[in-house]
Amino acid sequence: MRDDAALELPDFYTFKVFGHCSDEFSEQVRATIAATVGPIPLDSMKIRASAQGRYVCVSITTFVHSREQLERVYADLHSQTAMLLFL
């Protein structure tokens, strides 16, 4: 999780998650975040593949109500072995 002491919540927040490119990865990221913050509309999600196509970055912008909710999402993301890096 970003260490941003100036972060004021509730507000919109963008999660960026990197992992190996696969058919399931982006949906796994979406489902993991949605389990804590609620439904994630498809238009809130951006997917970008690396130059060689081996990795993908999934960015999801959603409303986060509290620091505790934000920390819960990051803990859930870290528990997924397919996730490589979270920003």
Image (cartoon, rainbow, N blue to C red):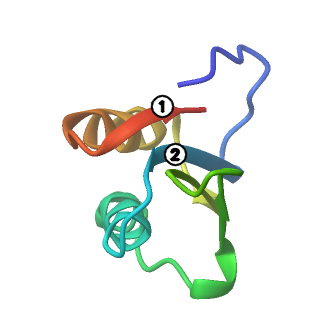
Q: Residue most toward the bottom?
A: 42
Image location of residue 87, percent across then percent down: 61, 32
Image location of residue 37, percent across then percent down: 43, 62
In front of the other: 56 or 46: 56
- State the image quarter where residue 32 is shown: bottom left
Three-letter amino acid code of the residue under disc 2: Val
The residue positioned 50% from the left and 51% from the top of the image is 54
Residue underneath mark 2: 17
Residue underneath mark 1: 85
The residue positioned 36% from the left and 63% from the top of the image is 25
The local secondary structure at tag 2 comes to strand
10 Å crowding of disc 1: few (<14), some (14-19), many (20+): few
Image location of residue 68, percent across then percent down: 41, 34
Left or right of 35? Residue 30 is right
Number of numbered labels in the structure image: 2
Labelled pair 2, 1 in contact (Cβ < 8 Å): yes
Left or right of 24? Residue 44 is right
Mark 2 vs 1, N-terminal side: 2
